[in-house]
């Protein structure tokens, strides 16, 4: 058996209450969200609608005292029954949410600023370039780094007295906001990394259908953030860290994000690639700024060496779908393939 708990905090939720109408909207949306992912886990198919024939039996337990808390129980399958994806539900939810909510462009930029400031500080202290300074320069050049290294940089900034941080707007409130965003990303990464092999079997087309279906549900899940609460944190009996955090800002990001149905041929260069999480950065004259690209789990191992080789080239052909904002401008890319010749 698996149990997912949802804790609302802030506003009315801190006294153990939610507005009845907002809670009703959230409950229906969350039931669709979790049932859609659970149905996919069991069958490998994205359901158009969740009906009684889907036989997704989930249960809810009473709320706890204090902040408004409820628990959803996912019963174990009957002996001998199998799932299409042999993972608990929690890692699959974490993986879907991670794709729906990548690190914000502002946070990525601010991480690079911190790396530059720290590299300059290190250079002043020591005339000889250290390994740490070289690593910091690489982050600045690439414009990206791993979540763990980004967290290290934010922790350094929180304890540093460098006045340049304030000049860049990197004061304690902004740094703590970044730390929360990175902590959440690290939590999700640790959850689905343990199930890499199973998640890699999810095909790109199925993944896109599942992302599209779940993204359309999220705004309804966030209705209690209008008057009842500030945020909701999903946790699991199968994990010590949070699975996802939902607030109005996150819901707005997800609802504004659309993916182009066609695969685009893009010319440019791969500036960085993190093999552990399958996220890279692509620079092209077709875009105003470098864009992140995400390689689906199913093809990540197959393309790893080719992408790393592509980083040595001044220009490559990247084939990808574009994630678009409400204005129709690209915000990131979904990797399809790459040619280095």
Image: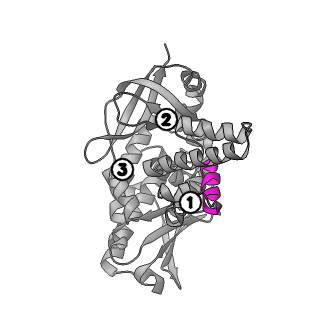
The answer to which image quadrant residue 119 occupies is top right
- Measured in 3D between alpha carbons, the distance from the residue under mark 3 to the one under mark 1, in whole angstroms, is 29 Å
Q: Secondary structure at mark 3?
A: helix
Residue that lies at the very extreme toward the left in this rendered image: 327
Answer whether labels 2 and 1 touch (C-beta < 8 Å): no
**Left or right: 80 in relation to 341:** right
**Left or right: 74 in relation to 282:** right
Question: Does residue 148 belong to the magenta stretch?
Answer: yes
Q: Which residue is mark 3?
A: 213
Question: Can residue 222 be seen at all in this image of the molecule?
Answer: yes
Residue 262 position within the rendered picture, expressed as x and y whole percent measured from the top left: 31, 30
Q: Is residue 115 above or below residue 23?
A: above
Question: Does residue 314 belong to the magenta stretch?
Answer: no
Mark 3 or mark 2, which has the lower sequence index?
3
Q: Is residue 256 above or below residue 299?
A: below
Prevalent SS, magenta region: helix
Q: Nearer the viewer, mark 3 or mark 1?
A: 1
Q: Is residue 245 above or below residue 149?
A: below
Residue 322 position within the rendered picture, expressed as x and y whole percent measured from the top left: 35, 36
Q: Which residue is mark 2?
A: 281
- Measured in 3D between alpha carbons, the distance from the residue under mark 2 to the one under mark 1, in whole angstroms, is 21 Å
Mark 2 or mark 1, which has the lower sequence index?
1
Nearer to us in this view, 283 or 242: 283
Q: Secondary structure at mark 2?
A: strand
The structure residue drawn at horizontal position 50% and vertical position 28%, both measured from the top left corner, is 270
Q: Secondary structure at mark 1?
A: helix
Answer whether labels 3 and 2 touch (C-beta < 8 Å): no
User: Which residue range is magenta in the image?
Assistant: 147-159
**Left or right: 219 in relation to 164:** left
Q: Nearer the viewer, mark 3 or mark 2?
A: 2
Mark 3 or mark 1, which has the lower sequence index?
1
Q: Which residue is mark 1?
A: 179
């Amino acid at each position: 058996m698996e149990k997912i708990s949802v804790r609302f905090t802030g506003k009315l939720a801190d006294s153990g209450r939610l507005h009845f109408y907002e809670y009703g909207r959230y409950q229906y949306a969350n039931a669709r969200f979790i049932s859609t992912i659970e149905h996919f886990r069991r069958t490998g198919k994205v359901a158009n609608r969740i009906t009684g024939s889907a036989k997704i039996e989930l249960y809810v337990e009473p709320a706890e005292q204090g902040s408004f808390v409820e628990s959803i129980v996912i019963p174990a399958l009957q002996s001998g029954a199998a799932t299409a994806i042999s993972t608990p539900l929690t890692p699959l939810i974490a993986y879907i949410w991670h794709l729906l909510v990548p690190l914000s462009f502002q946070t990525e930029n601010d991480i690079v600023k911190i790396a530059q400031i720290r590299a300059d500080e290190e250079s002043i202290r020591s005339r000889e370039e250290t390994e740490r300074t070289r690593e910091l320069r690489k982050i600045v050049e690439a414009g990206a780094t791993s979540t763990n290294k980004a967290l290290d940089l934010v922790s350094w900034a929180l304890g540093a007295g460098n006045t340049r941080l304030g000049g860049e707007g990197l004061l304690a409130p902004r740094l703590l906001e970044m730390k929360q965003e990175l902590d959440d990303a690290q939590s999700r990464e640790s959850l689905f990394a343990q199930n890499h092999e199973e998640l890699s079997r999810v095909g790109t087309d199925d993944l896109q259908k599942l992302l599209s279906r779940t993204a359309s549900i999220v705004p309804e899940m966030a209705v209690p953030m209008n008057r009842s609460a500030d945020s909701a944190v999903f946790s699991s009996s199968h994990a010590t860290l949070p699975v996802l955090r939902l607030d109005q800002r996150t819901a707005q990001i997800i609802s504004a994000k659309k993916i182009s149905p066609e695969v685009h041929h893009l010319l440019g260069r791969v500036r960085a690639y993190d093999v552990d999480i399958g996220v890279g950065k692509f620079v092209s004259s077709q875009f105003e700024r470098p864009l992140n690209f995400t390689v689906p789990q199913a093809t990540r191992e197959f393309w790893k060496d080719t992408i790393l080789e592509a980083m040595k080239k001044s220009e490559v052909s990247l084939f990808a779908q574009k994630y678009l904002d409400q204005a129709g401008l690209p915000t990131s890319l979904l990797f399809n393939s790459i040619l280095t010749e």
